Image (cartoon, grey):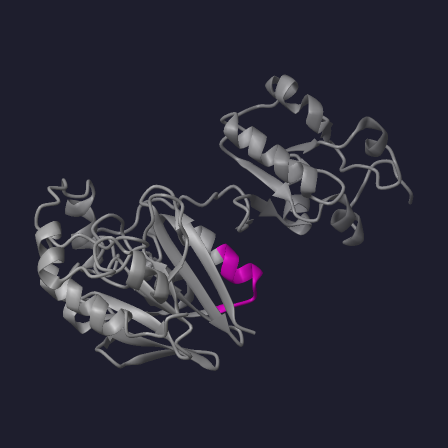
Amino acid sequence: MFVLRQLFDPTSSTYTYLLADSGQAVLIDPVFEQTARDSALLRELGLQLVATLDTHVHADHVTGAWLHRQRSGSRIVLSKAAGAVGADTLVAAGDTVGFGTRHLQARATPGHTLGCTSWVLDDLSMAFTGDTLLIRGCGRTDFQQGNASELYRSVHEQLFTLPAQCLLYPGHDYRGLTVSSVAEERIYNPRLGGSASEADFAGYMNHLGLPHPKLIDVAVPANLRCGEPLQAVGPSVEPTWAPLTFTFGGIWEIAPDSLAELAGRVQVVDVREAAEFTDTLGHIPGALLLPLAELDARKRELQRERPVVTVCRSGARSAQACVLLTRAGFPQVANLAGGMLRWRAQGHDVDGGDS
């Protein structure tokens, strides 16, 4: 089954795309700070990441390509023209990258930067255009070997020649727009569509007068190394107090077996109602009953310096409790995966409940 997911980084307004088939996946334009999110989604969908593909050397964020390779062994794929070091596969126009039974073909689309590559799905039903072509716009052309005339030709010769119904997925959007089509952009793109000529476009782009991206001095050098830090990565941002798993929903979870091993060393907070606490499922020995509706008012009963594990019947209410406590400034919070249902199913001790 073919899978497509469009993911968003709010800091840089970058879209990352996950494409998968037959258990194998690729990521287009991953963001360094979103590696945990992307890895969680891959794990939850049961996918093996085989490659990361950057559309160009970005100036507004650091790619997650190197970090994904460290975690999963995925290949780093980048254009030969990008001038970067550290990639596993350097591609030119016409080269393909496979995943499962599908593949993406590289189309050289320079102009925003010299090494810009658009990735086109094998059946020409969709294309991932990076910053070369945005929804009703395009990437700037005033740095990183940018060239307005070259960008105009890239779009008209490599993208506007795709089938009219081909969906176009951009590298960024700042207005909440998610997808366009070749037919739409041919007509309605105010810079490149309609009757705009190469001279019209070049005149427009050469007078934008935009400030340089705030992170350009950090992002470009890092991306020329495929995202590899100059120095060893510092202390992990992942929790070290227990073996936890990050979910695509943005919550850290702990398995029942791991929580059982931490007995007495963490604060177990049961957020069910009082009747449930002593009902058929019982409760974890030593757990503190703080019903979800009372959690905010009673959070002072918890010690901020000690880890907190939230618990409910199935893990749903306690996931929300995790979010509330994290927002309240508790630094070490995790949800019991599967709640009391899984805790009991795995044979762990309970107080009360049915024997």
Residue 42 in magenta stretch: yes
Identify the residue at horizontal 69%, vertical 43% (top origin). 315
Q: Quadrant of the C terminus?
A: top right
**27 above or below 232?**
below
| Residue furthest out toward the front | 195
Where residue 16 sits, quadrant-wise, is: bottom left
Camera sees residue 86: no
Q: Nearer the viewer, residue 70 or 271?
A: 271
- The image shows residue 174, relative to residue 230, as above or below, that is above
Q: Tell me the residue at 19%/43% (across/down).
A: 213
Q: Residue at x 76, y 32 (%)?
A: 272
Q: Is 39 on the left or on the right of 226, as rendered?
A: right
Residue 152 horizontal side relative to residue 319, left or right: left
Asked if residue 37 is among those painted magenta in the image, a careful observer would answer no
164 and 37: which one is in front? 164
* Range shown magenta: 40-48
